[in-house]
Amino acid sequence: TAPTWMKTNKSGYGGKLDPIYYSVYADYLVKYVKAMKTEGITIDAITPQNEPLNAFNNPSMEMTATEQTEFIKKYLGPKFMAASLTTKIIIYDHNADHPEYPITVLNDAAARQYVDGSAFHLYAGPISALSSVHAAYPDKNIYFTEQFTSSTGSFSGDLAWHFRNLIIGAPRNWSRNVLEWNLASDPNYNPHLTGGCSDCKGALTLNGDNITRNVSYYIIGHASKFVPPGSVRVESNVPGNLQNVAYVTPSGKKVLIVLNDSNTSQAFNIMFKGKLVTTTLDAGAVGTYTW
């Protein structure tokens, strides 16, 4: 949220950014990026608002597509440019059930010139919606920026869902990244604000000197350990329930991530330039193959 004194309801919950403070808030974000830089932290990108259609988080702030367009084209974009900031402006940052939101912002040429791309979560809507935004504006990037694993979930169920939809599904629908939420929590899923997520499980659970690695640690690790920045996704077919995504890394290594999204063990072939290897994955298992 913006500082509460800039908001219509003067609260950390819901409300909107008061239009009289659009210019002030843009200045605030410029100062934030600069202040972080002086601390040795480079802010690669910001979104004007996390989950702009959700007024029920703490903190939260509503921002319609029309309002975000106005804020970017008249205030945030010009002020970032005037300050010579290279920090990217990424729009939307909410669920895949409203792809019309980022498209509305991008339809405005004055706003579009300042926008690097669109960000998505998947608490609602299909992952294929990312492709619809890419199809409308293929020169703008797509990012996947949040998904949590719950304290009530199961390791096998969460592993399969996140690989099917995110680690595999998001890049196959043009996303340049996948971010899980969150990095670490204590055994009671703290810290969080009152009204914030009370059952969001960290990739790590920290209990004194004890560290427990949870499902999202392995979800991310299956990709991040083998697919470094600069890797390029390449085409691969999807036979039956063997969901997969393939990459070529900057060093030329090939990486194939496969989910056996069926109830039985599956044998399959990996073919590349006339060479073939046969392997097997148990039901619900994930494999990362490199050569």
Image (cartoon, rainbow, N blue to C red):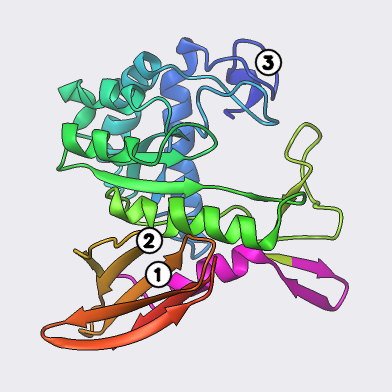
Is residue 214 located in the magenta-colored stretch of the structure?
A: yes
The amino acid sitting under disc 1 is Val
- C-alpha separation, residue under disc 2 versus residue under disc 1: 6 Å
* Frontmost residue, 250 versus 169: 169
Q: Are marks 2 and 1 in contact (CB under 8 Å)?
A: yes
Task: Tell me: 237 left or right of 23.
Answer: left
Q: Is residue 283 above or below residue 6?
A: below
Q: Give the position of the N terminus as an image quadrant.
A: top right
Residue picked out by circle 1? 258
The amino acid sitting under disc 3 is Lys
Residue picked out by circle 3? 10
Sequence-wise first label, 3 or 1: 3
- C-alpha separation, residue under disc 3 versus residue under disc 1: 48 Å
Task: Tell me: 51 left or right of 200.
Answer: left
The amino acid sitting under disc 2 is Gln
Give percent across and percent down for residue 183.
64, 61
Q: Which region of the structure is painted magenta?
A: 205-230
Sequence-wise first label, 3 or 2: 3
Which dot, 3 or 1, sits closer to the camera?
1
SS assignment at label 3: loop
Is residue 90 located in the magenta-colored stretch of the structure?
A: no
Give percent across and percent down for residue 118.
33, 38
Asked whether residue 230 is in view, the answer is no
SS assignment at label 2: strand
Residue picked out by circle 2? 243
At x 30%, y 45%, the residue is: 142
Sequence-wise first label, 2 or 1: 2
- C-alpha separation, residue under disc 3 versus residue under disc 2: 47 Å
At x 38%, y 22%, the residue is: 68
